Amino acid sequence: MNILKSYYIKNIIHYIIILFIILIPCYPIYYLKYLIFVPILLNIIWLTFNGCPLTDKEDVDFINMNVKYIFPNITIRQTDYLTSLILIIMISIIAFRFLNYDNKCKIK
């Protein structure tokens, strides 16, 4: 019972983190000057820990498990590519917002 509860808590934490990260391009420009580093730090964490530190090494890849609902035949390698693509798109959107930011409103 305790293991099951721990599993659900880790999943909820994962969903909260994913929601926070996916919504980064939507945050006000003031916060983006700090949050632009989150996708980069996320990749550094994945490289350092050889995956997500919240996920047990014996478990199935969390993102792959959830992406399989949309794409049933996706492999773990393809999921990694998809995740990288999404993070690159997010950084591009943030950079585009910075480039098109009106200089009348200064970032403090």
Image: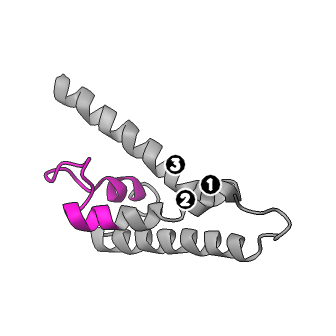
Q: Can residue 2 be seen from the camera position used here?
A: yes
Percent across and percent down for residue 60 are: 23, 54
Q: Please give the name of the residue rendered at 29% of the width and 68% of the height, measured from the top-left corner.
A: 76
In the picture of the structure, the residue carrying the numbered disc 3 is 19
25 is within the stretch colored magenta: no
In the picture of the structure, the residue carrying the numbered disc 1 is 31
Front of the two marks 3 and 1 = 1
Q: Please give the name of the residue rendered at 38% of the width and 58% of the height, measured from the top-left corner.
A: 68
Magenta span: 44-67
- Mark 2 residue crowding within 10 angstroms, few (<14) / some (14–19) / many (20+): few
What label does residue 34 carry, if any?
Answer: 2
The answer to whether mark 2 and mark 1 are in CB contact below 8 A is yes
Mark 1 residue element:
helix
Q: Please give the name of the residue rendered at 42% of the width and 54% of the height, measured from the top-left corner.
A: 69
3 left or right of 22?
left
> Closer to the camera, 87 or 74?
87
Q: Can residue 73 be seen from the camera position used here?
A: no
- Mark 1 residue crowding within 10 angstroms, few (<14) / some (14–19) / many (20+): few
What label does residue 80 carry, if any?
Answer: none
Amino acid beneath label 2: Tyr
3D distance between C-alphas at marks 2 and 1:
6 Å
> Closer to the camera, 16 or 65?
16
42 left or right of 76?
right
Percent across and percent down for residue 67 are: 41, 58
The answer to whether mark 3 and mark 1 are in CB contact below 8 A is no
| Image quadrant occupied by the N terminus | top left
- Mark 3 residue crowding within 10 angstroms, few (<14) / some (14–19) / many (20+): few
Amino acid beneath label 1: Tyr
3 left or right of 89?
left
Q: Please give the name of the residue rendered at 77% of the width and 63% of the height, measured from the top-left corner.
A: 106
Q: Which of the two labelled residues, at mark 3 and mark 1, occupies the earlier sequence position?
A: 3
